[in-house]
Image (cartoon, rainbow, N blue to C red):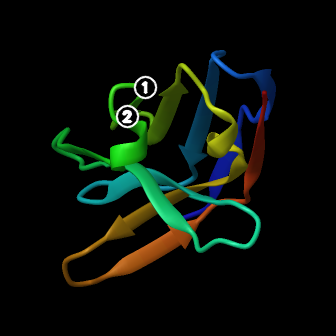
Amino acid sequence: VQLQASGGGLVQAGGSLTLSCAASGSTSSMYMGWYRQAPGKQRELVARVSSGGTTNYADSVKGRFTISRDNAKNTVVLQMNSLKPEDTAVYYCNTRRLITPQANYWGQGTLVTVSS
């Protein structure tokens, strides 16, 4: 599975951005989600959604970010509102299967910069 992410950019604090990611193959029974890595920090989960629609969010983005997926199109979207400078990071699309056969795929990163 290959993942193609898009939608990063520069935005002022309080603004919004939408990240999109398309998978080249089926993501059936797989989570789709977004991770981010800020300079000098470890990569962290931002949000993920299961094939059944169950979502998980990092505490720091709850109430501001919304993740959604289209199973028919194998796409995932992260709507980011009320952005803060601390949201600045490289965002990575990810899809993974936690059950056997396990799988884990990453897209190329897309930079999100939030200016104060």
Q: Which is more N-terminal, label 2 or label 1?
A: 1
Residue 12 point in image, percent of width and height: 77, 20
- The residue that appears at 62% across and 31% down in the rendered structure is 84
Residue 72, placed above or below residue 59: above
Q: Nearer the viewer, residue 116 or 63?
A: 116
Image spot of residue 59 (x, y percent): 33, 47
Asked whether disc 1 touches disc 2, contact meaning CB atoms under 8 Å apart, the reply is no
**60 lies left or right of 54:** right
Q: Mark 2 points at which residue?
A: 69
Residue 64's disc is 1
The residue lying toward the viewer, choosing from 113 and 102, is 113
Q: Report the residue that reaches farthest toward the front.
A: 116
Classify mark 1: helix, strand or loop.
loop
Query: How far across and how far down the image is residue 73, in percent?
Result: 44, 34
The answer to whether one can see residue 86 in this image is yes
Query: Can you say which quadrant of the picture contains the C terminus?
Result: top right
When the figure is inspected, residue 28 is found, relative to residue 65, above or below; the finding is: below
Instruction: Name the residue: 49% across, 64% down.
Output: 44
Residue 53 higher or lower than 42, as above or below:
above
Dot 2 alpha-carbon crowd within 10 angstroms: few under 14, some 14 to 19, many 20 or more: many
Q: Which amino acid does label 1 sit on?
A: Arg
Give the amino acid type for the residue marked by disc 2 in the picture.
Arg
Q: How many angstroms separate mark 1 from mark 2 (CA)?
A: 17 Å
Q: How crowded is mark 1: few (under 14 residues within 10 Å), some or many (20 or more)?
A: some
Question: Does residue 109 appear left or right of residue 70 in this picture?
Answer: right
The percent coordinates of residue 37 (x first, y second) are 65, 62
